[in-house]
Image (cartoon, rainbow, N blue to C red):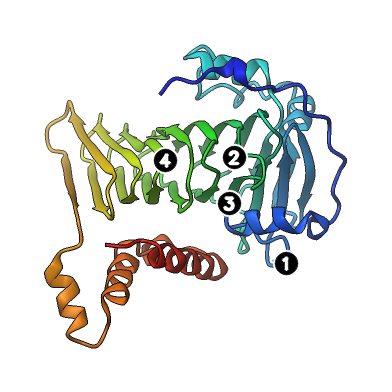
Amino acid sequence: MSVDLSHYSFDAQAETDHVQNLTLLPTMDQVRMVEAGIDVHDQQVSGAFMQLNNSAVHCNSKVPGIELLSIHAALKKYDGLPQHFWKLLNPDEDEVSRLAKEKLNGGYFVRVKKGAKIKEPFQSCIFIKGHKAGQSIHNIVIVEEDAEVHILNGCASAKEQDDVLHLGLTEYYVEKGGKLTFTMVHNWGEKVTVRPRSVGTVAAQGEFQSNYILLHPVGDLKMYPTLKLEGAGAVARFNSVIVAPNGSNLDCGNKILLNAPTTRGEVIARVLTTGGKVISRGLIAANAKPVKGHLECKGLILGGGIIHTIPELYSQEEGVELSHEAAVGKIAQEEIEYLMARGLDEDEAASTIVRGFLNVDIMGLPQALRESMDEQIATLNAHSAL
């Protein structure tokens, strides 16, 4: 679906003052943030960043192992970040990328220092509000040698104004032996258009786990993040849980390039539609040997909707191990009857099956986020009639 970029304003939003205490934000905005995985009252975080429209309104690191700056401050401090800024992404790839470069509103720079093991997650929130508002951000994440961090990134729009456009670009650099877990939770709206672009590179013995969660409506979203495993023994995992209510139009997937020996990649997607359209893509390419990769997409249709899966495996080498599994269907009646025979009514049986299908235990999420997701899935189930 094409986007009329001229429909949105990237310049008209006034600069917003710094927010020292995020708990003073409007209550309704905080609720939207919680549903995007961000709890401003949570003190068990290593740092916090918030972008509101065009402004970085909060930027605070609580531990010495993390350097956190707004992208504008980082570009100034590091003379334009010549080794990282627009090195994995191409600003001339398409009109979205060109506009994102021209209308850079903000974003964050996170550097986890060599050997630092950050126990508490780092929390960032990208928030947009205002009629026909456009937001263009560019993030840089660097995990240095033998460092570890979990970044919890929540993106949301205000409930009362949702005719907006979000352009989010991110470049990830995981150095030798580094480990990055990146969890992104989206909470958009029925008229929100979203165009993320992200590419990451992982060095020898590095690990990158990406978790993506979308449980709420979004007007139009298109994204295809890519990870390049460039060092021997590097590992990449993509886990996605996606719900598409009526009116949502999604074209999303993940790509892993196994460019070095003994690398491993895995793409796991769980897609549920209650009336929306989803194109679920996945690609694992083996450009070295020996390597291993597995791609899995399972779709569940409740009350209508469309799921189109496109799994792809590519290899130009002998001796690689690549596999894929894709399945789309509805809840089997015998499963419902089995649970009803054990005392559940039909709605309870359907809810139990859906909760199992959207199982997030594999994702290693923080307890607070898992509980929030369980509550949201329970609400979803209550409104998903068979």
Q: Of marks 1 and 2, which one's residue comes earlier in the chain?
A: 1
Q: Secondary structure at mark 1?
A: loop
Seen at 60% across and 27% down, the residue is: 84
Q: Which residue is mark 4?
A: 247
Q: Quadrant of the N terminus?
A: top left
Q: Secondary structure at mark 2?
A: strand
In this rendering, the label closer to the viewer, 4 or 1:
4
- Image vertical order of residue 148 relative to residue 85, above or below: below
**Which dot marks residue 43?**
1
Closer to the camera in the image, 177 or 254:
254
Q: State how far apart marks 2 and 3 are (Cα).
A: 11 Å
Seen at 47% across and 46% down, the residue is: 217
In this rendering, the label closer to the viewer, 4 or 2:
4
Mark 1 closeness class: few <14, some 14–19, many ≥20 residues within 10 Å: few
Q: Which residue is mark 2?
A: 142
Q: Position of residue 159 (x, y in %)?
A: 64, 48
Q: Which residue is mark 3?
A: 151
Q: Of marks 1 and 3, which one's residue comes earlier in the chain?
A: 1
Q: Of marks 4 and 2, which one's residue comes earlier in the chain?
A: 2
What kind of residue is marked 2?
Ile
